[in-house]
Amino acid sequence: MMSTKAFTLVSAVERELLMGDKERVNIECVECCGKNLYVGTNDCSIYHFLLEEQSLPAGTATFTATKQLHRHLGLRKPVCELRAASALHRLLVLCDYSITLVHMLSLEPVPSGARIKGAVALALNENPVSGDPFCVEVCIISVKRRTIQVFMVYEDRVQIVREVSTPEQPLAVAVDGHFLCLALTTQYIILNYSTGAAQDLFPYCSEEKRPIVKRIGRQEFLLAGPGGLGMFATVAGISQRAPVHWSENVIGAAVCFPYVLALDDAFITVHSMLDQQQKQTLPFKEGHILQDFEGRVIVATSKGVYILVPLPLEKQIQDLLASHRVEEALVLAKGARRNIPKEKFQGMYRRILQQAGFIHFAQLQFLEAKELFRSGQLDVRELISLCPFLLPTSSSFTRSHPPLHEYADLNQLTQGDQEKAAKCKRFLMTYLEEVRSSEVVHGYKEDVDTALLKLYAEAGHASLLDLLVTENACLLADSAAWLEKHKRYFALGLLYHHNNQDAAAVQLWVNIVNGEIDDPTRADLYDYVVDFLTHSPDHALVWKHADWALQKSEEVGVQVFTKRPSEEQQDGFNPDDVLTRLKKYPNALVRYLEHLVMDRNLQREEYHTRLALLYLDAVLQRTPGASGSGAEVTETQAKLRRLLQKSDLYRVHFLMERVRDAGLPMERAILHGKLEEHEQALRTLALELGDFPAAEDYCAWSSAEFDAAQVLQLLPGTWSVQLLCPFLTGAVRDSTHTRRTAQVALGLATSENLIYKHDQMKLKRSSFRLSDKQLCQVCHSPFCEPVFVRYPTGDLVHTHCAASRHTNPSAPRPGART
């Protein structure tokens, strides 16, 4: 058992103040109501003291008692019990089996002499059922055997309202509403005095121990059970709390939430109602009274009165945290909720959770720490500040005061152990990753993201790049210096890009590719830079670094022009400008022209002709004099042939001059075909090259261009119809299609002609009169001769006015059609 200082024992009434030199006077009972302390003695006297409390800085207090009055009741019997009824300004005094009503200040009996006779013990109902504010409900154990009586007590009179029989003789009683909790001779029971229903609780032996029955809250009681247990029971006869373990010889009990206090012949023990553990032990001999009065706990011997002053719960919790007793501190903090205003409790509890989190963090118990930090809504900068220089220099953060922990920095926390420090930083990384997108960091996301970047950079963590390519709030100045310090230059470029400094980013990456600075982060950095430029909206930046990209690799570098989005190629990169830039880079020039001709399908003769010439030059340089079907066809030569076959835009005669004596018969044959010189083309393929499959391919490629009637005349008579079937089928299909298309066109034209004839006939059927008094509807002048134009609307205009309407669209329009 680890001790907790929950209470301090201080003296309230010394012996000299109470009884002077009267040796035989002993304290029998006490009552406290506000500042008023009443003491009943064995010589039938009542003492009234006024208590003044003075708080001390340590959280405790001292009390000064001032005697107000002493009154002897005129009997020789001890005062057994005192109960204050503050609403009535009365004190109920049990002496010689009679309860007398006296004034709380004068201690004089009420003039009416009202009293309750035949009482062995009494209990006030603190949860009254009558609802009358000018009376109190009192329950007594009657001198009658096995009888409980219920009274209504007013300022100057009493009234019995119920008498209840019990199965055995009652020895102690507590009351809540209609429910009585009774200690009988052999057992405890709950008895509803309104309905008579009884509920057995548990047995005990009254001959072996003194019974204890105490109301501790609404519909809940504390009982002295067997085996040294303090048992809790509700009016329903069940226990909602685990029992506390106290002495077998307990003689008194009190409750000061969240603690139960027990008194035996040598000690006062303090037990938690939250975890049922014994928290404190105070030596106290000869005690025989232990009671609580509205949160104030009083203990007395036969000669003196003492007060158990509870330390503030916050101080108790802080003491537990200082001893690293985290779970106990949290249990106590949760239990304190009912005694502290909601807003104050929430703030206090969050702080306690944060403190507990730092204790677990220092013990490298990271899962527990994370849950406490989250539950306590920790300002994560408290955690970041343990690592020097992680917070940006512009941060306005200052640590909580009082501090949440005792550590200056991570080095002190880990006592210089680098392995522990690394573990702490790894935890910090994962925690920042989790909270950076939550509402917890609202208002200081820059501090969090900058700290996370620094942790990644220091550890060489792969997530550094992920952080920089997604939305982040890293501060440029701090982050750039840190990345440069740790030689994370590629990441620094990403940071520049995120801050719209693409020129600085690209220049930094270019320096890495050129070997001027070392950063092995990306082996494909050159390709990355080309791709970055390809998608960059900064055209000046692209033009600036285009030569560098092309010098490194023409095939890759040209992609800054060929892979750009099509709308940007039209707006910012004029093909002629690009072609001018690519003059020094022949391979890139070919690739860009391919892009213009084949990918973008630009229909400009100069592009097609220039590409064909570049192909031709490459073929001639690679295979001079190569001819015939046996020569290996290079990729470039295949591209040349496809371009010559598919394109109709290049300058055929110009290329023919270049090809004619170049030893490229296949290319010459294709150009003959483009010039519709099919006979020369086929002669070249079949006779010059002897490449009959090529001749067949040519026919298949050019057959749509042949006049079928002429072809049939040229073919040998020995060829069978089956052999010519594919050609004849295609020719017949084309001829049929052409004829049907012409028929459709003829039909449409005929229909249109009929429509106009119909309109003309309708116009000729009508008649009208023209005189020199009628006016032209365009110029509003009279007609001077019988020459005019009439519109379908009936409007008449001069012929020259009608002509001007067709040449001048803004002229008045009398009709839509003539």
Image (cartoon, grey):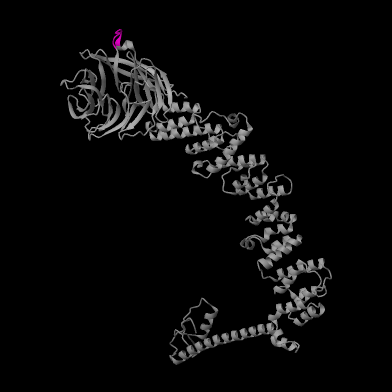
Q: Nearer the viewer, residue 590 or 191?
A: 191
Residue name at image x 53 percent, y 84 percent = 800
Residue 224 spot, x, y in % from top left = 34, 25
> Could one spot residue 396 in this view of the protein?
no
Q: Is residue 715 left or right of residue 808?
A: right
Would you say 806 lies left or right of 642 here?
A: left
Q: Is residue 18 left or right of residue 430?
A: left
Position of residue 673 relative to residue 403, above or below, is below
x then y, percent, for residue 546: 70, 56
Location of residue 28 with respect to 628 vertically, above or below: above
Q: Is residue 634 magenta?
A: no
- At x 45%, y 32%, the residue is 330
Q: Which quarter of the figure has residue 697? A: bottom right
> Furthest residue to the right?
625
Q: Residue at x 81, y 78 (%)?
A: 690
Question: What secondary structure characterizes most of the magenta part?
Answer: loop
Residue 782 in picture, x, y percent from top left = 46, 86
**Along the line of sight, the residue nearer the viewer: 449 or 807:** 449
Q: How many marks?
A: 0
Above or below: residue 332 compared with residue 77: below
Q: Position of residue 167 (x, y in %)?
A: 24, 29
Residue 22 among those drawn in magenta: yes
Q: Nearer the viewer, residue 185 or 416?
A: 185
Q: Residue furthest top?
A: 21
Q: Which residues are magenta?
A: 19-25
Relative to 809, is 686 on the left or the right? right
Is residue 603 at least partly visible in the picture? yes
